[in-house]
Image: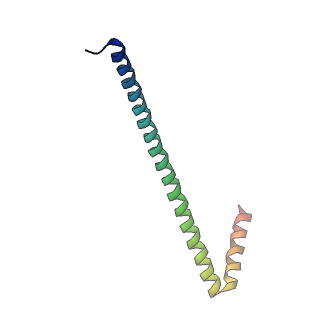
């Protein structure tokens, strides 16, 4: 049979280990949640970048075909903004 102080010390160590394990699990879950949010943000940014690259590429192609056409497009857009 163990002496009472050894039993008490063992009990305290188990309690501390359980708390540490619980804290680690909590931090792991929070980290996974943050990673998930960052991944969603990154996907949104990548989608926006792809759209911007597509539009820029389209405008460049349009400019290569007929440089004055872009002036016409932007004139219409400017007129639209003025009418709002």
Name the residue rendered at 71%, 64% in the picture.
81
* Residue 8 placement: quadrant: top left
Name the residue rendered at 41%, 37% in the picture.
25
Image location of residue 52, percent across then percent down? 59, 68
Asked if 3 appears above or below 59 in the picture, the reply is above
Name the residue rendered at 46%, 38% in the picture.
27
Q: Nearer the viewer, residue 78 or 1?
A: 1
Q: Nearer the viewer, residue 17 or 2?
A: 2
Residue projecting furthest to the top: 4
Image location of residue 28, percent across then percent down? 43, 41
In the picture provided, is 13 more to the left or to the right than 42?
left
Asked if 29 appears above or below 52 in the picture, the reply is above
Q: Nearer the viewer, residue 67 or 13?
A: 13
Asked if 65 appears above or below 5 in the picture, the reply is below
In the picture provided, is 7 more to the left or to the right than 62?
left
* Residue 5 placement: quadrant: top left
Q: Nearer the viewer, residue 74 or 82?
A: 74
Residue projecting furthest to the left: 1
Assign the C terminus to one quadrant of the image: bottom right
Assign the N terminus to one quadrant of the image: top left
Image location of residue 34, percent across then percent down? 49, 46
Name the residue rendered at 29%, 15% in the picture.
2
Image location of residue 4, percent across then percent down? 33, 12
Numbered disc total: 0
Residue projecting furthest to the right: 82
Asked if 57 appears above or below 37 in the picture, the reply is below
Q: How is the image coloured?
A: rainbow
């Amino acid at each position: 049979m163990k002496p009472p102080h050894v039993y008490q010390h063992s009990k305290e160590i188990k309690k501390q280990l359980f708390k540490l394990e619980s804290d680690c699990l909590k931090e792991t879950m929070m980290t996974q949640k943050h990673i998930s949010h960052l991944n969603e943000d990154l996907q949104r940014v990548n989608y926006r970048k792809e759209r911007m690259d597509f539009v820029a590429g389209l405008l460049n192609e349009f400019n290569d075909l007929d440089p004055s056409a872009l002036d016409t497009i932007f004139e219409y857009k400017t007129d639209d903004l003025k009418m709002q």
